[in-house]
Image (cartoon, helix red, strand yellow):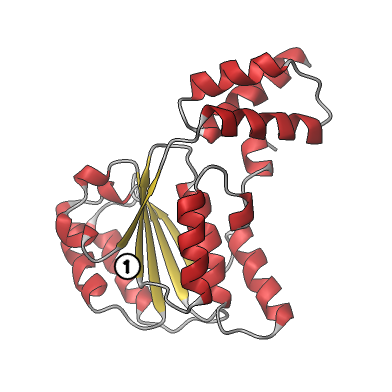
Amino acid sequence: MSLYRKYRPLTFADVCGQDHIVTTLERASEQDKLAHAYLFAGSRGTGKTSGARILAKIIMIHGIEDETLQKQIINGVEDLNIVDLLEIDSASNRGIDDVRDLIEKIQFSPVVASAKVYIIDEVHMLTKEAFNALLKTLEEPPSHVKFIFATTGVDKLPETVQSRCQRFDFKNISLENIRKQLSLICKSEKIVANEDVFGFIAKYARGGLRDALSVLDQLISFAA
Protein backbone atom coordinates (compact mmCIF):
# COMPACT_ATOMS: atom_id res chain seq x y z
CA MET A 1 0.00 0.00 0.00
CA SER A 2 1.29 3.48 -0.89
CA LEU A 3 2.26 5.81 1.95
CA TYR A 4 -0.40 8.31 0.90
CA ARG A 5 -3.15 5.73 1.26
CA LYS A 6 -1.70 4.23 4.45
CA TYR A 7 -1.38 7.61 6.16
CA ARG A 8 -4.44 9.30 4.71
CA PRO A 9 -6.10 11.31 7.50
CA LEU A 10 -9.16 9.61 8.98
CA THR A 11 -10.10 12.34 11.47
CA PHE A 12 -9.75 16.10 11.52
CA ALA A 13 -6.98 15.68 14.12
CA ASP A 14 -4.93 13.94 11.40
CA VAL A 15 -5.34 16.72 8.81
CA CYS A 16 -2.08 18.52 8.12
CA GLY A 17 -1.78 22.29 7.71
CA GLN A 18 -5.47 23.24 7.45
CA ASP A 19 -6.21 24.28 11.04
CA HIS A 20 -8.47 27.17 9.97
CA ILE A 21 -10.80 24.76 8.16
CA VAL A 22 -10.70 22.01 10.76
CA THR A 23 -11.59 24.39 13.61
CA THR A 24 -14.52 25.93 11.73
CA LEU A 25 -16.02 22.59 10.69
CA GLU A 26 -15.61 21.05 14.14
CA ARG A 27 -17.38 24.01 15.74
CA ALA A 28 -20.17 23.87 13.15
CA SER A 29 -20.69 20.20 13.95
CA GLU A 30 -20.71 20.79 17.72
CA GLN A 31 -23.24 23.61 17.33
CA ASP A 32 -25.39 21.63 14.88
CA LYS A 33 -24.85 24.24 12.17
CA LEU A 34 -23.68 22.11 9.26
CA ALA A 35 -24.51 23.53 5.83
CA HIS A 36 -26.27 21.63 3.04
CA ALA A 37 -23.44 22.20 0.55
CA TYR A 38 -19.70 22.72 0.91
CA LEU A 39 -17.05 23.77 -1.58
CA PHE A 40 -13.46 22.72 -0.88
CA ALA A 41 -11.07 24.63 -3.15
CA GLY A 42 -7.31 24.44 -3.43
CA SER A 43 -4.26 22.94 -5.09
CA ARG A 44 -3.80 19.20 -5.53
CA GLY A 45 -2.64 17.17 -2.57
CA THR A 46 -3.74 19.65 0.11
CA GLY A 47 -6.38 17.41 1.70
CA LYS A 48 -9.65 18.35 0.00
CA THR A 49 -10.93 14.83 -0.69
CA SER A 50 -9.69 13.49 2.64
CA GLY A 51 -11.40 16.42 4.35
CA ALA A 52 -14.59 15.69 2.44
CA ARG A 53 -14.63 12.07 3.61
CA ILE A 54 -13.97 13.07 7.21
CA LEU A 55 -16.80 15.61 7.06
CA ALA A 56 -19.03 12.97 5.46
CA LYS A 57 -18.46 10.66 8.44
CA ILE A 58 -19.43 13.42 10.87
CA ILE A 59 -22.58 14.23 8.89
CA MET A 60 -23.62 10.62 8.45
CA ILE A 61 -23.39 9.64 12.13
CA HIS A 62 -24.93 12.88 13.40
CA GLY A 63 -27.75 12.09 15.81
CA ILE A 64 -27.05 8.34 15.82
CA GLU A 65 -26.56 7.07 19.38
CA ASP A 66 -25.87 3.40 18.62
CA GLU A 67 -22.06 3.04 18.75
CA THR A 68 -22.08 -0.16 16.72
CA LEU A 69 -24.01 1.57 13.93
CA GLN A 70 -21.67 4.56 14.13
CA LYS A 71 -18.67 2.28 13.60
CA GLN A 72 -20.41 0.55 10.73
CA ILE A 73 -21.03 3.88 9.01
CA ILE A 74 -17.50 5.16 9.64
CA ASN A 75 -15.95 1.95 8.30
CA GLY A 76 -18.27 2.11 5.29
CA VAL A 77 -17.12 5.63 4.44
CA GLU A 78 -13.44 4.76 4.88
CA ASP A 79 -13.85 1.71 2.63
CA LEU A 80 -16.15 3.58 0.22
CA ASN A 81 -18.68 0.77 0.36
CA ILE A 82 -21.68 2.36 2.06
CA VAL A 83 -24.78 3.04 0.00
CA ASP A 84 -25.48 6.44 1.60
CA LEU A 85 -22.20 7.91 0.32
CA LEU A 86 -21.59 8.55 -3.35
CA GLU A 87 -18.20 9.84 -4.46
CA ILE A 88 -18.06 11.01 -8.07
CA ASP A 89 -15.03 12.00 -10.16
CA SER A 90 -16.22 14.71 -12.53
CA ALA A 91 -13.24 14.10 -14.80
CA SER A 92 -14.98 10.95 -16.03
CA ASN A 93 -18.61 11.58 -15.00
CA ARG A 94 -19.21 15.11 -16.19
CA GLY A 95 -22.29 15.02 -18.38
CA ILE A 96 -25.94 15.84 -17.83
CA ASP A 97 -26.93 12.16 -17.82
CA ASP A 98 -24.55 11.53 -14.92
CA VAL A 99 -26.08 14.40 -12.94
CA ARG A 100 -29.63 13.32 -13.77
CA ASP A 101 -28.81 9.86 -12.45
CA LEU A 102 -27.47 11.46 -9.27
CA ILE A 103 -30.60 13.60 -8.87
CA GLU A 104 -32.85 10.56 -9.20
CA LYS A 105 -30.97 8.80 -6.39
CA ILE A 106 -31.16 11.88 -4.16
CA GLN A 107 -34.90 11.49 -3.73
CA PHE A 108 -34.49 8.28 -1.72
CA SER A 109 -33.95 8.50 2.03
CA PRO A 110 -30.69 7.22 3.56
CA VAL A 111 -30.56 3.49 4.20
CA VAL A 112 -28.15 3.28 7.14
CA ALA A 113 -26.81 6.75 7.95
CA SER A 114 -28.61 9.86 9.19
CA ALA A 115 -27.97 11.60 5.85
CA LYS A 116 -26.87 10.91 2.29
CA VAL A 117 -23.64 12.61 1.26
CA TYR A 118 -22.52 13.30 -2.29
CA ILE A 119 -18.84 14.10 -2.81
CA ILE A 120 -18.13 15.46 -6.28
CA ASP A 121 -14.40 15.73 -7.00
CA GLU A 122 -13.08 18.21 -9.58
CA VAL A 123 -16.60 19.59 -9.80
CA HIS A 124 -15.48 22.38 -12.14
CA MET A 125 -15.24 19.80 -14.94
CA LEU A 126 -19.00 19.28 -15.12
CA THR A 127 -20.56 20.52 -18.35
CA LYS A 128 -22.72 23.65 -18.42
CA GLU A 129 -25.83 21.50 -18.91
CA ALA A 130 -24.85 19.33 -15.94
CA PHE A 131 -24.42 22.40 -13.74
CA ASN A 132 -27.82 23.70 -14.77
CA ALA A 133 -29.41 20.37 -13.87
CA LEU A 134 -27.63 20.32 -10.51
CA LEU A 135 -28.48 23.91 -9.63
CA LYS A 136 -32.16 23.33 -8.87
CA THR A 137 -31.28 20.59 -6.40
CA LEU A 138 -28.76 22.92 -4.74
CA GLU A 139 -31.45 25.59 -4.44
CA GLU A 140 -34.01 23.22 -2.90
CA PRO A 141 -32.09 20.26 -1.45
CA PRO A 142 -33.91 17.48 0.39
CA SER A 143 -33.26 17.70 4.13
CA HIS A 144 -31.49 14.32 4.14
CA VAL A 145 -28.89 15.27 1.49
CA LYS A 146 -25.53 17.03 1.84
CA PHE A 147 -23.13 17.97 -0.97
CA ILE A 148 -19.36 18.34 -0.71
CA PHE A 149 -17.66 19.67 -3.83
CA ALA A 150 -13.89 19.60 -4.29
CA THR A 151 -12.00 21.47 -7.00
CA THR A 152 -8.56 22.59 -8.12
CA GLY A 153 -10.20 25.06 -10.53
CA VAL A 154 -12.63 27.10 -8.48
CA ASP A 155 -12.47 30.01 -10.96
CA LYS A 156 -14.10 27.73 -13.55
CA LEU A 157 -17.06 27.06 -11.28
CA PRO A 158 -20.25 29.05 -12.03
CA GLU A 159 -21.00 31.82 -9.51
CA THR A 160 -24.54 30.45 -9.17
CA VAL A 161 -23.11 27.20 -7.78
CA GLN A 162 -20.48 28.86 -5.60
CA SER A 163 -23.04 31.14 -4.00
CA ARG A 164 -25.03 28.15 -2.75
CA CYS A 165 -22.08 26.54 -1.00
CA GLN A 166 -20.09 27.25 2.12
CA ARG A 167 -16.60 27.68 0.71
CA PHE A 168 -13.33 26.64 2.31
CA ASP A 169 -9.98 27.38 0.71
CA PHE A 170 -7.31 24.76 1.35
CA LYS A 171 -3.93 26.46 1.40
CA ASN A 172 -0.65 24.95 0.29
CA ILE A 173 0.93 23.04 3.15
CA SER A 174 4.00 24.74 4.56
CA LEU A 175 7.49 23.33 4.05
CA GLU A 176 7.83 22.82 7.80
CA ASN A 177 4.57 20.90 8.09
CA ILE A 178 5.52 18.64 5.19
CA ARG A 179 8.97 18.03 6.66
CA LYS A 180 7.46 17.10 10.03
CA GLN A 181 4.96 14.75 8.42
CA LEU A 182 7.65 12.99 6.38
CA SER A 183 9.84 12.63 9.46
CA LEU A 184 6.98 11.16 11.53
CA ILE A 185 6.09 8.68 8.80
CA CYS A 186 9.69 7.52 8.41
CA LYS A 187 9.94 6.96 12.16
CA SER A 188 6.67 5.02 12.10
CA GLU A 189 7.97 2.90 9.20
CA LYS A 190 11.35 2.47 10.95
CA ILE A 191 13.13 4.07 8.01
CA VAL A 192 16.40 5.88 8.68
CA ALA A 193 16.68 9.01 6.55
CA ASN A 194 18.71 12.20 6.51
CA GLU A 195 16.52 15.07 7.70
CA ASP A 196 17.84 17.24 4.84
CA VAL A 197 16.11 14.93 2.37
CA PHE A 198 12.73 15.90 3.83
CA GLY A 199 13.47 19.54 3.04
CA PHE A 200 14.29 18.76 -0.57
CA ILE A 201 11.13 16.69 -0.97
CA ALA A 202 9.00 19.41 0.63
CA LYS A 203 10.32 22.03 -1.79
CA TYR A 204 9.71 19.76 -4.77
CA ALA A 205 6.13 19.04 -3.64
CA ARG A 206 5.23 22.77 -3.69
CA GLY A 207 2.70 22.58 -0.89
CA GLY A 208 1.16 19.22 -1.77
CA LEU A 209 1.57 16.51 0.85
CA ARG A 210 0.35 13.80 -1.52
CA ASP A 211 3.15 14.58 -3.98
CA ALA A 212 5.68 14.62 -1.14
CA LEU A 213 4.59 11.16 -0.01
CA SER A 214 4.72 9.91 -3.57
CA VAL A 215 8.35 11.03 -3.87
CA LEU A 216 9.20 9.48 -0.51
CA ASP A 217 7.61 6.22 -1.68
CA GLN A 218 9.81 6.24 -4.79
CA LEU A 219 12.97 6.92 -2.79
CA ILE A 220 12.19 4.07 -0.40
CA SER A 221 11.61 1.70 -3.32
CA PHE A 222 14.87 2.82 -4.97
CA ALA A 223 16.85 2.32 -1.76
CA ALA A 224 15.34 -1.10 -1.01
Against 129, residue 152 (above or below) is above
Residue in the picture at 47% in, 40% down: 46
The residue lying toward the viewer, choosing from 69 and 21, is: 21
Residue 73 relative to residue 188: left or right: left
| Residue 30 image offset from top left, x and y in percent | 53, 75
Asked if one can make out residue 84 in the rendered structure from this viewpoint, the answer is no
Against 23, residue 115 (above or below) is below
Q: Amino acid at mark 1?
A: Asp
Q: Splitting the image into 4 quarters, where does residue 64 fall?
A: bottom right
Q: Quadrant of the N terminus?
A: top right
Residue in the picture at 50% in, 72% down: 29
Q: Splitting the image into 4 quarters, where does residue 66 fall?
A: bottom right
Against 202, residue 37 (above or below) is below
Q: Residues within 10 Å of mark 1 (few under 14, many from 20)?
A: few
| Residue 63 image offset from top left, x and y in percent | 57, 84
Residue in the picture at 26% in, 48% down: 124
Number of labelled discs?
1
Residue 56 relative to residue 108: left or right: right
Against 180, residue 157 (above or below) is below
Asked if one can make out residue 68 in the rendered structure from this viewpoint, the answer is yes
Q: Quadrant of the C terminus?
A: top right
Query: In what element is the residue under mark 1?
Result: helix
Residue in the picture at 45% in, 69% down: 117
| Residue 217 image offset from top left, x and y in percent | 66, 25
Residue located beneath label 1 in the image: 101
| Residue 7 image offset from top left, x and y in percent | 67, 43
